[in-house]
């Protein structure tokens, strides 16, 4: 098992340092759900298909992320509370190179 250390700041501004598995094909939204860092039913509503913005987060680290795809960009164009560093957690895979990733969950819309 190979885990990476990432930091997630929840919607109550509580910082959580967690171990995220890189060998289970999980994305950031799934990690947030598995650690119960957002109330049930408030994150990942579309199941990780980039069809809602419930998993929107703000990237606070310089971690190199995969390029934003068209569907993610389109969803963020319609979302609330979007900032220049906004991404959808469902589109960020947990990979070894994500070590040190730090994000803040966007407010529930």
Image: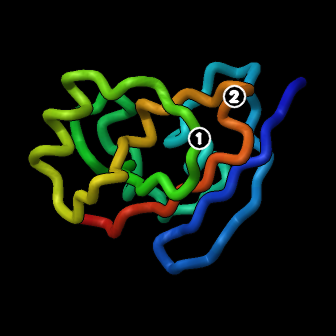
Quickly name the residue at label 2. 97
C-alpha span from label 2 to label 1: 8 Å
Front residue of this view, candidates 32 and 98:
98
The residue most toward the front is 62
Q: Is residue 58 above or below residue 70?
A: below
Q: Is residue 43 above or below residue 72?
A: below
Disc number placed over residue 43 in the picture, else none: none
Left or right of 51 in this view: 35 = right
Quickly name the residue at label 1. 63
Q: Residues within 10 Å of mark 1 (few under 14, many from 20)?
A: few
The residue most toward the right is 1
Left or right of 88 in this view: 37 = right
Name the residue: 89% across, 24% down: 1
- Residue 70, x across and y down, in percent: 20, 23
Name the residue: 38% across, 24% down: 67
Q: Residues within 10 Å of mark 2 (few under 14, many from 20)?
A: few
**Which quarter of the figure has residue 95?**
top right
Q: Is residue 15 above or below residue 86?
A: below
Q: Is residue 36 above or below residue 97?
A: below
- Residue 71, x across and y down, in percent: 20, 25
Question: Which quadrant is home to the C terminus?
Answer: bottom left
Q: Which element type, helix, strand or loop, lies under badge 1?
A: loop
Q: How is the image coloured?
A: rainbow
**Which quarter of the figure has residue 93?**
top right
């Amino acid at each position: 098992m190979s885990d990476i250390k990432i930091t997630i700041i929840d919607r109550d501004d509580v910082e959580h340092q967690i171990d995220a598995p890189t060998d289970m094909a999980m994305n950031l939204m799934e990690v947030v759900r598995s650690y119960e860092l957002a109330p049930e039913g408030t994150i990942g509503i579309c199941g990780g298909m980039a069809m809602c913005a419930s998993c929107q987060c703000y990237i606070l680290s310089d971690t190199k992320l995969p390029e934003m795809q068209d569907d993610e960009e389109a969803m963020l164009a319609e979302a609330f509370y979007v900032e220049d560093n906004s991404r959808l957690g469902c589109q960020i895979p947990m990979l070894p190179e994500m070590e040190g990733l730090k994000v803040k969950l966007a407010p529930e819309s």
